[in-house]
Image: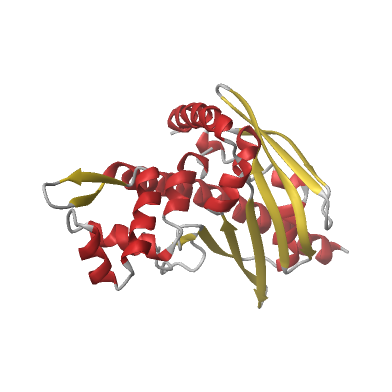
Amino acid sequence: MDETTKPAATPNQTTMQVDTGRTIIITRRFNARAATVFEAWTSAALVKRWWAPKSHGVSVVSCEADVRVGGRYRYVLRHSSGEIAFSGEYREVTPPTRLCYTQVFEPMADAGAVLVTLTLEEQAGKTLLVATEVYPSRQAREAALSSGMEHGMRETLDQLDELVASLR
Amino acid sequence: MGHIWPMVETFTALAEPSRLRIVEYLRAGARPVGAISTALHLPQPQVSKHLRVLKQARLVDVEPRAQQRLYALRPEPLRELGAWIDRYRALWEARLDDLDALVTELEHSRSTRKRKG
């Protein structure tokens, strides 16, 4: 599956590329310095203002972030049928050019964590952001799940499908 | 929030390059293991191993025939993955539009403060 979006003619448009079936790469250019973008990505007060777009019918209930290597963050979202949380740990923190962290969807924490690497490249006051999300390998997933959990995971997947469908 | 988790099994089954090639090859129609092995230059035992993973992920079905089994692609998981990718892209586009507005506002207020300071 080679789902590649060609970079748009407008340089500030978001592009998303699916690579090798386990990696998603998102890019976007901003008319701002790297330090500003880095801060907006990591400051709990600022993350609230963009991470859950209103157009998707969810809102941010709380953001906590301890931005240092080994520090943790947690974002709680509210949707029509309840609250869900994403959380993780920072692996690399090199402001303003590089950030690396894990991300777990808490209702399915056993399925493993996504590894996100963010790079910010600044030139003449504009910044190119590249976010690379690497999803857990099948081996990692199988190690995390025991046979007894598979049924529970399928139920959670069904509930999640309903939730996602209700948000469209 | 559209997220990968509903698609974990499909996504990770496709994560192996040879399996991805097998799936793309089977788009043309159902094939036996031998034909897949020859067309993709992969040893037959490896093809069988990959087909087992793809079958477990419900990406392929086996059609038993008199002389040989044919492996056929099931389109539903790929369609679901395609739909999920579309939703996820829309989510990121919306997020990054909001982030764009925020950082533009932050930059503007900073330069305004500098001019006043």
- Quadrant assignment for the C terminus of chain A: top left
Whole-percent x, y for residue B103 in the image:
67, 57
Which residue in the rendered view is the most extreme toward the right?
A: B117
For this rendering, which residue is in front, B88 or B23?
B23
Question: Can the viewer see residue B62?
Answer: yes
Which residue in the rendered view is the most extreme toward the left?
A: B66
The quarter holding residue A92 reads bottom right
At x 41% / y 55%, what residue is drawn?
A: B14
At x 57% / y 41%, what residue is drawn?
A: A53
Whole-percent x, y for residue A20 in the image:
45, 63
Question: Can the viewer see residue A2?
Answer: no
Whole-percent x, y for residue A45 in the image:
77, 44
Whole-percent x, y for residue A49 in the image:
67, 43
At x 84% / y 56%, what residue is drawn?
A: A68
Which residue in the rendered view is the most extreme toward the front?
A: B67
Vertical order, B52 against A63 (above or below) = below
Coloring scheme of the render? secondary structure
The number of callouts visible is: 0
- Quadrant assignment for the N terminus of chain A: bottom left
For this rendering, which residue is in front, A166 or B31?
B31
Which residue in the rendered view is the most extreme toward the top?
A: A81
For this rendering, which residue is in front, A155 or A168?
A155
At x 54% / y 32%, what residue is drawn?
A: A153
From the viewer's perspective, is A162 left or right of A132?
left
Vertical order, A163 against B73 (above or below) = above
Vertical order, A137 against A59 (above or below) = below
